[in-house]
Amino acid sequence: MFEWSETDEMIRDAVRGFIDKEVRPHLDALDSGEMEPYPVIRKLFSEFGIDVMTGEIVGKMLAKQRKREEALAAGEPLPGKDGKKSSGDSIMGGQESMMAVLIAELSGVCMGLVTAMGVSIGLGATTIMSRGTLAQKERWLEDIVTMKKVAAWAITEPDSGSDAFGGMKTYVKRDGEDYILNGQKTFITNGPFADVMVVYAKLDEGDGADKRDRKVLTFVLDKGMEGLTQGKPFKKMGLHASPTGELFFDNVRLSKDRLLGETEEHKGGDGRESARSSFTAERIGVAFMALGIINECHRLCVDYAKNRKLWGQEIGRFQLVQLKLAKMEVARINVQNMVFSALERGRAGKQPSLAEASAMKLYCSEAATDVAMDAVQLFGGNGYMTEYRVEQLARDAKSLMIYAGSNEIQVTHVAKGLLTQ
């Protein structure tokens, strides 16, 4: 893949039309927090049929799984079991290219919308999809993928950001067939308003084992559970359209049907494994978001360089301005090629490794931040004003260097991947 297909471009144009009509007029309200992102996302899903599409995909996947489980229970041959994974075996059902276009276009105007949507579906629903039992998937998945309900994915804590597992203090203790959850999570996207929360906690077996090495379990909580408190949205530098907050757990009783997989001995390993898989997808998603930031800054700056005049000529005639535009173009080409590579590998069933995803995240987030800051500089005093929007793009872009794991930790993952080859 070296360019967007005609279908991709048609989708892009339609998304741009939606953005011009439903997002740009509300940017101030979204950026101030006066307007929540979820009604806009639901309208997007409705207008483009994404809610119907994802609902049908999930319905078919669950029906297939139900048939297989019924056949297994009856001792019959498993239907359709050929060992191959089809494009329909994911929530997006092979429509990843469409989602890449949608994410990039939205990110260039209001990245907070993408973050709110991406965490709910890309992390919340995907974790339930990969680790949940059939009953758990039927209980939560459809409402999340159609955006009827909003999900949060809670792993980060006040003392365990990059050291997510080792420093984790939130814990569960067994109480008969149930578990009792205590602790706190922070910087949780959608946390203040989430209907469903995927929560990671360590199992305290009271055996004196090293706390860093204790098993990590994954639970699904619902809004309003006794002992669960969802904090108010934080005030942040950027991503204002994406509510971020804390979750507090005070002796929250969890029945076994809330433990993903309904067993502590999950076939895919403990909660660390599902989180690492989510990290990979999340970091690839950062490349899509970075492309949107770069594309919008590129567009705004080229237009400004053609029309802004100083000393009787367009500023695009000045070499230092040309240098900024040229560097933006190089960044655009590089990041877009990384996005195309990720899409092609996904179609071939060869997902990037965690180290490769970290490399993509590291480069793309830095490129987007550099481009956005250069855009502010190119606009001069106007760039510092909210009216011209490049200041918002710069604030949002900076979050990509922290979001999905700080760039410092990406360096570690890339290096480990190289050194263990």
Image (cartoon, grey):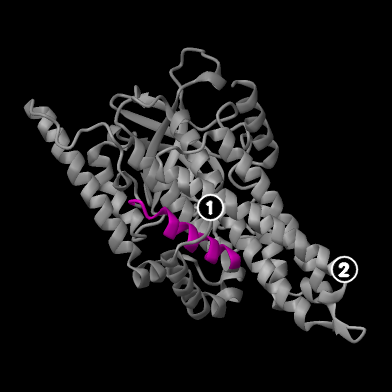
The amino acid marked with disc number 1 is Gly
Q: Earlier in the sequence, mark 1 or mark 2?
A: 1
Mark 1 neighbour density, 10 Å: few (under 14) some (14–19) many (20 or more): some
Quadrant of res 217 = top left
Q: Position of residue 411 (x, y in %)?
A: 68, 34
Mark 2 neighbour density, 10 Å: few (under 14) some (14–19) many (20 or more): few
| Mark 2 element type | helix
Quadrant of res 30 = bottom right
Quadrant of the image containing the C terminus: top right
Q: Is residue 241 visible?
A: no
**Is residue 418 rendered to the left or right of residue 378?**
left
> What range of the chain is rendered magenta?
93-108
Query: Which residue carries the number 2 mark?
Result: 319
Query: Residue sitting at 49 percent across and 66 percent down?
Result: 37
| Mark 1 element type | loop
Query: Which residue carries the number 1 mark?
Result: 231
